[in-house]
Amino acid sequence: MRKVTLLILGLLTTAHLLASISVKEKQALLDLYQSTNGNEWTQPWDLNDSPENWKGVTIFRDQVLAISLKNNNLVGTLPSSLGNLKSLKVLNLHNNQLSGYIPSSLAKIKGLKTINLSLNRLSGVIPSGVFEMENLEYLDLFFNNLEGSLVSDLSKMKNLRRLSLYSNKLNGPLPESIADLTQLRDIQISSNQFSGPLPNGIVALPKLKRLSVFDNDFNGEFPSGLNALNLEELSYHDNNFNNTSATLVSGK
């Protein structure tokens, strides 16, 4: 009887070790593969193998934590089922050929820290829910065809460190609430169609190191307090600011 009990315990332990991700999470990965022409990826997945062995997928304790498929020739659109990856921390699909819209379902992944969809062909607006993601640290959407304006309230993104939206077709003002993002180090929004004055509150961001706003339609007074921030990068040319030479020591 003792041997039988030990055998059962052993089988249960083995079964636990071999436990896999949920059906929903695996389907989300398969949806991504199928909707982005997975067979033509530079490094395709072997769908007969376990998801734990699919390149670019990080799984821990039966949950998908990261998808990193940069420079992998993904061609197509992003499936809404990505929102079913509830434990995802990192989504990095940089430098592919993704088109269509950013799924609004991404905003349902409460613990997501990195969204990098830069250097693709995405269009439409940035889903408003993205700007409510409290744990998001890096939002990299540069070099796409995104349009529309930013939501007025950015304050919920309290952990955001980098906002990188340059080379899109975004317009409207830069919200005053950006001054509430005290963890921000990089603001890179050049080569868009942003307009209006720059929020004076930018000068109060304690960790800001890079501010790149060139090639937009900003106007009004440029915040002279930026001189005191000792920025590593400051680019503001090709806008409609009032005379900046008298207020700024450095920058271009």
Image: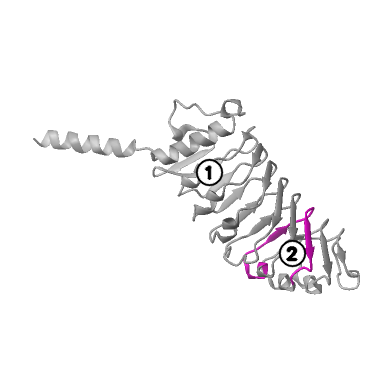
Residue 231 x %, y % = 76, 64
Residue span colored magenta: 178-199
Three-letter residue code for mark 2? Pro
Confirm whether the magenta stretch covers residue 13. Answer: no
Nearer to me, 149 or 246? 149
Residue 240, placed above or below residue 168: below
Q: Position of residue 86 (x, y in %)?
A: 45, 49
Residue 235, above or below 140: below
Distance of label 1 from label 2 (alpha carbons): 29 Å
Q: Is residue 86 left or right of residue 228?
A: left
Crowd class of label 1 (few under 14; some 14 to 19; many from 20; radius 10 Å): some
Query: Is 31 placed above or below 208 here?
Result: above
* Residue 135 drawn at (x, y percent): 53, 59
Residue under numbered circle 1: 80
Residue 207 location (% of width, % of height):
67, 66
Residue at (58%, 65%) from the top-left corner? Answer: 158
Name the disc covering residue 186, or none: none
Residue 166 lies left or right of residue 32; in this view the side is right
Picture disc at residue 173: 2
